Amino acid sequence: MASLWVHLNITPADAPSYPGSFRIAGSSGYDQTLTIAGHFAPNGGAIDIQFKKVPTTATYSLWYIGSDGEPELLVQNAPFQSLNDPSPPGS
């Protein structure tokens, strides 16, 4: 298991008030939803969201859930490494 850092093109200044959340669900049964405003880490001029204790051998789907509560599928059945930011905060 490892942390999965998802890189988002949202500025650190906008992130504290950015609406919505991201949900990741995997073929391993992993399923977690995190709000953007409460779970971001600045990474240069953008931000990352860290999902913790994610199995690295599964495939994952990623949704953005807007303030209206409607999920929007962004990625479907992608391997861990293709979603993980290669330059997470502090690296």
Image (cartoon, helix red, strand yellow):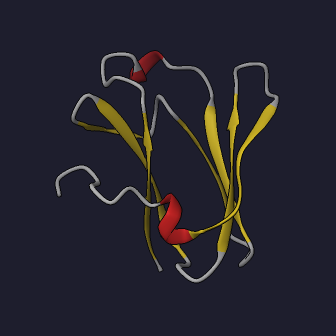
Q: Residue at x 50, y 19 (%)?
A: 18
Is 57 left or right of 9, judged from the image as shown? right
Give the number of marks: 0
Is 8 left or right of 79, judged from the image as shown? left
Q: Residue at x 79, y 27 (%)?
A: 69
Is 36 left or right of 85, judged from the image as shown? right
Percent coordinates x, y for residue 37 in the rendering:
47, 28
Identity of the residue furthest to the left in this view: 90
Q: Quadrant of residue 34?
A: top right
Q: Quadrant of residue 7?
A: top left
Percent coordinates x, y for residue 10 in the rendering:
41, 26
Q: Residue at x 78, y 19 (%)?
A: 68
Whether 43 is drawn above or below 33: the answer is above
Identify which residue, 38 or 71, lies in the foreground. 71
Q: Residue at x 75, y 74 (%)?
A: 27
Percent coordinates x, y for residue 91 in the rendering:
17, 58
Percent coordinates x, y for residue 20 in the rendering:
62, 27
Q: Quadrant of residue 87?
A: bottom left
Whether 77 is drawn above or below 69: the answer is below
